[in-house]
Image (cartoon, grey):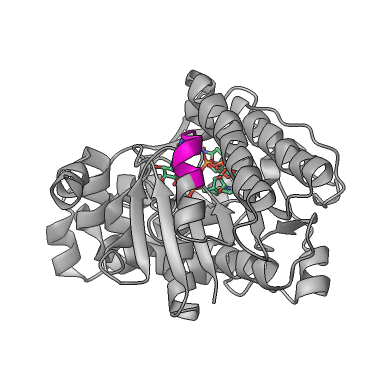
């Protein structure tokens, strides 16, 4: 039986991981530490918050003494670190928060883990798993081989530079102090609970609301789309079988240009609306509610500064060593994601207008 501390467990990937882990490992203890920034929502954990094996702590990973107490008091043996500022566009407009959370925050966790696990020896075995990104490897040309674990680091945005710095700190704590770490670098995730500022959920919500679909530059940038459930399975395999001190890349095997994705989402939506009077009545501003194609909303806008052209992941290591296989194909994954947003309108409206915070305040007020 494991005792996990999951940082950032109220965010997109972290909350999917919490759902996945408690389903697969019902006897395990799981504590979430999350600051509940704009990107963290307790509603992502509804249905879990009341379970005995679960505890939620609102707090900052930069609070080293809080992390030490949690590791000690809960006899945590496994720390899975998702907490971060995660949106590239925000990092371009305000890099400081990214250095604070991603670099200093990760260092704070490492210091706490070193003190409690290595100095105080509170548990016989421990693992610090760090969740990172393929963006640390930089940008690929159309014919370049996909990123592998030995691709040199070349981060291009303040976000990816902050994640690269955190990866190096994790590596250093293993080599210098013997902390038992693993790191995963994954590609673009998508699926339930994805905050509607990232490409896929933003496009879904904007189609439904009849708002412009902003396509940066020529729209030909390529990402390797990974369904969040495949990502969670990859991390689970690393925790179970991964070699300490190693890095594993996790990808979805689904490279696609942004315009392909947006056109596919538009086509799925047009199909859903066709003949569905209830949907047309719910989303009166959607083009498809008024007989127009959703792709009429596509609008080319100024490119993101320093926009990486292509990311692609070589999964050979995790596939051959740990038996990982991405299971969700992109077209099926996009369909199920559209369905999730159609079925969870109250979720995306609440997280976008911030009203979930009132719910949090009621549930967690002292
Ligand atoms: P997210 O922005 O949806 O969630 C981040 C969570 O961390 C939120 O719940 C937020 O409240 C919390 N948080 C932020 N700063 C904190 C702090 N100082 N202390 C405690 N909690 C804090 O992010 P995500 O998309 O779920 O990404 C999770 C991790 O995966 C990040 O480390 C990110 O770099 C990495 N990653 C994400 C993707 C992706 O496609 N989303 C791909 C590769 C790697
Ligand atoms: O590759 C992994 C990374 O994927 C993660 O580390 C990041 O946390 C995550 O945010 C994501 O970064 P991207 O910048 O690739 O994701 P985003 O959804 O912001 O953008 C995807 C692509 O779509 C990118 O080429 C920019 C483009 N885009 C994005 C938005 C929000 C648009 O064309 N229009 C948009 O409005």
Q: Is residue 155 positioned above or below 137 on the image?
A: above
Q: Is residue 300 positioned above or below 191 on the image?
A: above
Which one is in front, 248 or 260?
248
Residue at x 37%, y 56% (from the top left corner): 193
Residue at x 85%, y 46% (from the top left corner): 144
Q: Which residues are magenta?
A: 61-68
Residue 5 image offset from top left, x and y in percent:
49, 57
The quadrant in which the N terminus is found is bottom right
Q: Within the magenta stretch, is there residue 168?
A: no
Residue at x 44%, y 69% (from the top left corner): 29
Q: Is residue 366 positioned above or below 16 on the image?
A: above
Which one is in front, 271 or 348?
348
Q: Quadrant of ligand 2?
A: top right
Residue 238 image offset from top left, x and y in percent:
69, 66
- Looking at the image, residue 296 sits to the left or right of residue 241; the answer is left
Residue at x 51%, y 20% (from the top left corner): 96
Residue 363 image offset from top left, x and y in percent:
17, 52
Which one is in front, 22 or 140?
22
Q: Quadrant of residue 47?
A: bottom left
Q: Quadrant of residue 121?
A: bottom right
Which one is in front, 3 or 240?
3
Residue 182 image offset from top left, x and y in percent:
72, 55
The quadrant in which the C terminus is found is top left
The number of numbered badges drawn on the structure is 0
Q: Is residue 271 positioned above or below 35 on the image?
A: below
Q: Is the stretch drawn in magenta largely helix, strand or loop?
A: helix
Work out whether residue 301 can be spotted.
no
């Amino acid at each position: 039986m494991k005792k996990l501390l999951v940082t950032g467990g109220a965010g997109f990937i972290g909350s999917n991981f919490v759902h996945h882990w408690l389903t697969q490992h019902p006897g395990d203890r799981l504590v979430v530490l999350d600051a509940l920034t704009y990107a963290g929502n307790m509603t992502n954990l509804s249905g879990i918050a009341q379970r005995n094996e679960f505890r939620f702590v609102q707090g900052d990973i930069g609070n080293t003494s809080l992390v030490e107490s949690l590791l000690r008091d809960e006899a945590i043996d496994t720390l899975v670190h998702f907490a971060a500022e995660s949106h590239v566009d925000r990092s371009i407009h305000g890099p400081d928060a990214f250095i604070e959370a991603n670099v200093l925050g990760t260092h704070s966790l490492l210091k706490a883990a070193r003190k409690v696990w290595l100095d105080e020896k509170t548990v016989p075995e421990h693992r610090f798993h760090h969740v990172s990104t393929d963006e640390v490897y930089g940008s690929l040309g159309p014919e370049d081989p996909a990123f592998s674990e030995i691709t040199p680091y070349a981060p291009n945005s303040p976000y990816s530079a902050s994640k690269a710095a955190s990866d190096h700190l994790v590596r250093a704590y293993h080599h210098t102090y013997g902390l038992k770490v693993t790191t995963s670098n994954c590609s673009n995730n998508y699926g339930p609970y994805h905050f509607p500022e990232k490409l896929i959920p933003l496009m879904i919500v904007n189609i439904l609301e009849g708002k412009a679909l902003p396509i940066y530059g020529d729209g030909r940038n390529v990402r390797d789309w990974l369904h969040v459930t495949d990502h969670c399975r990859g991390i689970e395999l690393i925790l179970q079988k991964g070699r300490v001190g190693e890095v594993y890349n996790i990808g979805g095997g689904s490279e696609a240009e942004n315009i392909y994705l947006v056109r596919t989402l538009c086509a799925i939506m047009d199909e859903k609306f066709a003949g569905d009077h209830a949907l047309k009545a719910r989303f009166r501003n959607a083009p498809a509610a008024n007989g127009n194609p959703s792709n009429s909303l596509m609008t080319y806008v100024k490119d993101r500064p320093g926009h990486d052209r292509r990311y692609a992941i070589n999964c050979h290591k995790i596939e051959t060593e740990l038996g990982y296989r991405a299971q969700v194909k992109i077209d099926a994954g996009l369909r199920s994601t559209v369905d999730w947003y159609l079925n969870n309108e109250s979720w995306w409206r609440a997280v976008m207008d911030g009203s979930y915070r009132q719910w949090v305040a009621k549930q967690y007020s002292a």
